[in-house]
Image (tube, rainbow, N blue to C red):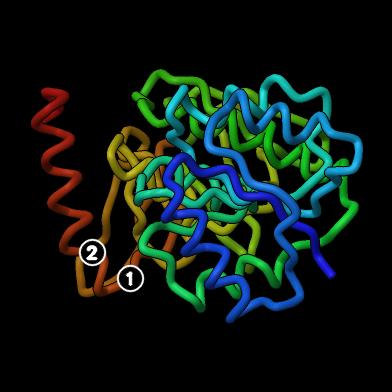
Amino acid sequence: MKKAIIIEDAPQGIKNLRTMLRIVAPEVKVIGTAKSIKEGIRLLSRPEVEPDVAFLDIRLEDGLVFRLLNQLEEVNFEVIFVTAFDQYTKQACDFSSIGYIHKPIDPDELRDAIARIRPHRRYWSQKRLESFRIHQSQAGLNEFSPLVLSDTGGYQVVSLKDIMYLQGCDNCTMVYLEDGRRFLITKHLKLFEKLHNLYFHRIHQSFMVNLRFVTFVSRGDSGVVRLKEGTELAISKLRKPLFLLRLKQYQIENLEL
C-alpha cells in the first residue's frame, strides 16, 4: 500500500483525484488533504502523516506550493505536480525526473506517474527537487545565461555561449565546451530542446549545435556541419533545410554576412 496526500485548493479537484485513484490505482491510500500552504504545512507536521507521495497543485489560494516545499526540513516523499499545463514547469519536471500530470487528468498519465513511485528513497526525492528548482529558474534563458548541469561529479555551471555542441547517446547527453571540457549528463538530448529558442539547433537525432560555432555546411541532401575547431558532425536530410534557414537568420541578426 502506498500512502498519499493531496494538496489542492479546489475541493472538486481533490474529489476528482480521489475518485480516479480508486479506479486506476487502488493500492494508493489518501491519508490526508489540504487546500493551502498553511494547511499543507500543518498536515505534514503531524507525526502520523508519513506519505510516500504528495500530489501537489502548483497554484494554491495562498501562493505557490514551492513555498511549502521550501519550508520543510526534509522532503522524504515523492512529489507529483498536478496542475494546468505549463511548458517550463513540465520541462523542469522532465529534466529532474519529477512526476507531472496536467489537468484534466488523464488516467494513463496518472497510472504511469504512480508506477514510478519508489517509497523511502529520501535522498533522491530531495536531490530531484533541488534539480527541479534550478531548471525551473532557467525558464528565461538567454545566450549569456549560466546553465547548471548535474553530472556524476556534482553540479557544473557553464555559460550557454561556451557550449559548442551536444551529443545524445541513449538516455545520456555529452556537452562539449569551447575550452575542450566535456560533461556527461544523464538526461536525454530531447530535454535540451528549450535551447532552440536561443542559438542552438538540432541537426541530427544525435547532435545539437551552437550556431555561433558553425563554419561550414556541405552541399547535398545530408552531409556534415563543421565547427570552428574542426569537428565535423553529421546532419540529417530532413533537418537540413530548416537548419540552413536558421543559420541564415542567425547571420543576419549578427551582421555576419
Asked whether, in this view, residue 237 is left or right of residue 119, the answer is: left
What x and y, as percent, mark residue 243?
A: 22, 55
For mark 2, what is the residue?
240
Considering the numbered disc 1 on the image, is that residue within a helix, a strand or a loop?
loop
- What amino acid is labelled 2 in the image? Lys
Residue at the location (23% across, 64% down)?
A: 240
Tell me: 178 left or right of 68: left
The residue to which callout 1 is attached is 236
Describe residue 146's horizontal placement relative to residue 10 as left or right: right
> In the rendering, at what x and y percent does residue 139 appear?
40, 31
Q: Tell me if mark 1 has few (under 14), some (14-19) or many (20+) residues whose alpha carbon lies within 10 angstroms of its own.
A: some
Using the image, determine if residue 154 lies above or below residue 15. Answer: above
| Amino acid type of the residue tagged 1 in the rendering | Ser
Please tell me which residue lies in front, 18 or 229.
Answer: 18
Residue 190 x, y percent position in the rendering: 47, 58
- Residue 241 in the image: state x and y as whole percent: 16, 63
Quadrant in which the N terminus is drawn:
bottom right
How packed mark 2 is, by other alpha carbons closer than 10 Å (few <14, some 14-19, many 20 or more), is many
Residue 132 in sight: yes
Please name the residue shown 69% across and 31% down the image. 130
Q: Nearer the viewer, residue 55 or 94?
A: 55
* Residue 34: quarter of image: top right
